[in-house]
Image: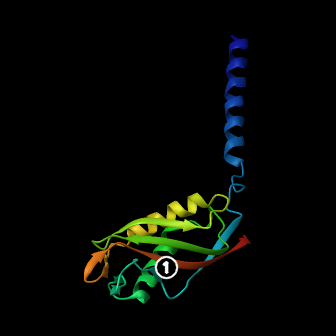
Amino acid sequence: MKALLLFMALLTANFAWAQQDVEDRDDNFITETNKNILKIDIKEPLLQVAVKNCNEFKPAAFEGGVVVYKEILRKYMYDYLNPDFYVLNGDFTFTLTVDQTGKVTQIEGAPKVANSSYFFDDMKYVVRRIKKNWTPASCNGQPVSSQIKLKMSFSSIGTDL
């Protein structure tokens, strides 16, 4: 009986000390230690590739103009890009293909650098989030597909917290 009582006392004490260790443990070591701040500069003007053999080319236009598109794009980039996942520094060019209906059908980014595929995928998502359509380019009065080139400069500043 004494052996059973001693066994139960040791078992209870063991669980009590184990619980105490978990409660007193300091979990503050799991914190965010750095933060990246992203600065975006979208260059003007937006360049368009003209259609060959076209006498009367009218470029594609965004509802509200270039300034409105730049502001919407910049806002969405700050909302949806993750500067903590990748560091962006330098100049990038994005080519948007606007089809005959005014929808952006293709987005290509350049230059290709290490791990830029993640950034380019995020940029495709950002551009597709813009719900307003473009007025398509026209050649001799007929809507045609065109390409719009966006030049942007990025700079990331890393800080330790």
Tag 1, which secondary structure? helix
- Depth check, front residue: 70 or 103: 103
Q: Position of residue 108 (x, y in %)?
A: 50, 65
| Image position of 127 (left or right of 92) | left
Q: Residue at x 67, y 21 (%)?
A: 8
| Image position of 38 (left or right of 6) | left
- Above or below residue 68? Residue 116 is above
| Image position of 40 (left or right of 133) | right
Q: How many marks?
A: 1
- Above or below residue 1? Residue 96 is below
Q: Residue at x 57, y 63 (%)?
A: 119
- Depth check, front residue: 34 or 88: 88
Q: Residue furthest front?
A: 53
Crowd rating for badge 1 (residues with CA inside 10 Å; few <14, some 14–19, many 20+): some
Display coloring: rainbow
Q: Which quadrant of the view contains residue 19?
A: top right
- Depth check, front residue: 130 or 45: 45
For label 1, the residue is: 74
Q: Position of residue 31 (x, y in %)?
A: 68, 59
Q: Position of residue 150 (x, y in %)?
A: 51, 78
Q: Residue furthest top?
A: 1
Q: Position of residue 65 (x, y in %)?
A: 37, 88
- Depth check, front residue: 90 or 139: 139
Q: Residue at x 68, y 13 (%)?
A: 4
Q: Quadrant location of the N terminus? A: top right
- The kind of residue tagged 1 is Arg
Q: Quadrant location of the C terminus? A: bottom right
- Above or below residue 77? Residue 85 is above
